[in-house]
Image: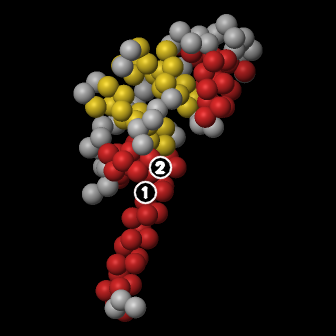
Amino acid sequence: METARNILERKGGDVAAVAGTASVLEAAKMMNDRRIGAVVVVDGQQVVGIFTERDVLNRVVAERRDAATTRVQEVMTAPVACCRLSTPLSELRSVMTEKHLRHLPVVEDGKLVGMISSGDVLASQVTLQQTTIEYLNAYLYGRR
């Protein structure tokens, strides 16, 4: 059974994280430089929120806040849904679909160990389906 651990083993556990005291401008620059849509907001190793492109648009731009002086903790999404390394792919997909999330931080023993995106879930699903198709094809028609 595919889990969050399997996804992170393939993509790596590098996570973009910022302190809640960082400015929105700093967080947005990090997101832009790394070409990502979200950063995890941490207090030490503890996840306290998530800051996404939607937060920039809805809570900063639309409210005409100054990105240089607004702190991430003022506009982040909290509390944030998280998963564990043992969370099955089907549960990741369900939570992301039901809660309309694109990113899920992975937390184990209270520590941030990775981030799963909806794209990661989709890629894993496609890989699993392709493997199943190849297996069934070999079973029905024999190996060529």
Marks 1 and 2 sit apart, C-alpha to C-alpha, by 6 Å
- The disc at residue 124 is 1
User: What colouring style does the render use?
Assistant: secondary structure
Marks 2 and 1: in contact by CB < 8 Å? yes
- The disc at residue 120 is 2
Which amino acid, by three-letter code, is at mark 2?
A: Asp
Q: Quadrant of the N terminus?
A: bottom left
Residue visible at 55% across and 31% down in the picture:
38
Which amino acid, by three-letter code, is at mark 1?
A: Ser
Q: Position of residue 43 (x, y in %)?
A: 41, 14
Residue 78 in view (yes/no):
no
* Callout 2 crowding tier (Cα within 10 Å): few <14, some 14–19, many ≥20: some
Horizontal arrangement in the rendering, residue 133 relative to residue 50 (left or right): left
User: Helix, strand, or loop for circle 1?
Assistant: helix
Q: Position of residue 13 (x, y in %)?
A: 41, 38
Residue 44 in view (yes/no):
yes
Residue visible at 52% across and 49% down in the picture:
119
Horizontal arrangement in the rendering, residue 112 relative to residue 16 (left or right): left
| Residue closest to the far top | 69
Q: Position of residue 121 (x, y in %)?
A: 45, 51
Residue visible at 66% across and 31% down in the picture:
32
* Callout 1 crowding tier (Cα within 10 Å): few <14, some 14–19, many ≥20: some
Q: Is residue 39 above or below residue 101?
A: above
Residues 95 and 36: in front is 36
- The disc at residue 66 is none
Q: Position of residue 41 (x, y in %)?
A: 48, 21
Residues 73 and 143: in front is 143
Residue visible at 72% across and 21% down in the picture:
62
Q: Is residue 34 above or below residue 65?
A: below
User: Helix, strand, or loop for circle 2?
Assistant: helix
